[in-house]
Amino acid sequence: MYHDRPRATLRARLARWAAALLALALLALGGAVLARRVGRDLDDQGAAALRQAVLDAAVQCYAVEGKYPESLDRLERDYGVQINHDRYIVTYDVFASNQLPDVQVLQK
């Protein structure tokens, strides 16, 4: 037996469309927030990896030469450390040639 289903009113159809658009907007906003957070985490990991690379190269220099390098330029030139100077600011403070330098990496 066939029964006619009553058609939804214009107000009900508009309410469904508004709910769908609101859900889509919330989903897009959530995706944007998540993408920003992931990007920030990747930037933090990049800075930490660069700091560790500089420290590893300094320790390698100490193992080979018996003293820590006096400058960051020396690590870049002789030990293959590559720094994106457009993206990071690296401070390399040496107290003495037999003490591990203080290395800090900041994002521009």
Image (cartoon, helix red, strand yellow):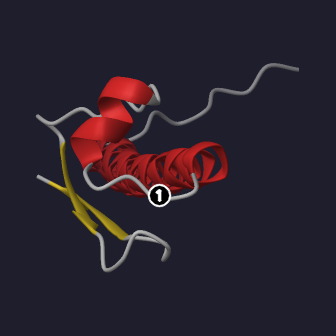
Residue at point 45%, 25% (across, down) = 80
* Image vertical order of residue 2 relative to residue 53, above or below: above
Q: Quadrant of residue 103?
A: bottom left
Q: How far from the left and from the top, in percent, is residue 13? A: 34, 40
Q: Which residue ends up furthest to the top in the rendered image?
A: 2
Which residue is labeled 1 in the image?
48
* Image vertical order of residue 67 relative to residue 95, above or below: above
Mark 1 lies on a secondary structure that is helix
Badge 1 local density, few (<14 within 10 Å), some, or many (20+)?
some
Q: Is residue 53 left or right of residue 25?
A: right
Q: How far from the left and from the top, in percent, is residue 41? A: 45, 56
* Image vertical order of residue 91 relative to residue 14, above or below: below
Q: How far from the left and from the top, in percent, is residue 81? A: 41, 32
Q: Quadrant of residue 3?
A: top right
Instruction: Report how many numbered discs are placed on residues in the image.
Output: 1
Q: Give the amino acid type for the residue marked by disc 1 in the picture.
A: Ala
In depth, the one of 83 and 69 nearer the eye is 69
Residue at point 36%, 49% (across, down) = 43
Q: Is residue 10 visible?
A: no
Q: How far from the left and from the top, in percent, is residue 21? A: 30, 42
Residue at point 21%, 63% (across, down) = 91
Residue at point 63%, 26% (across, down) = 4
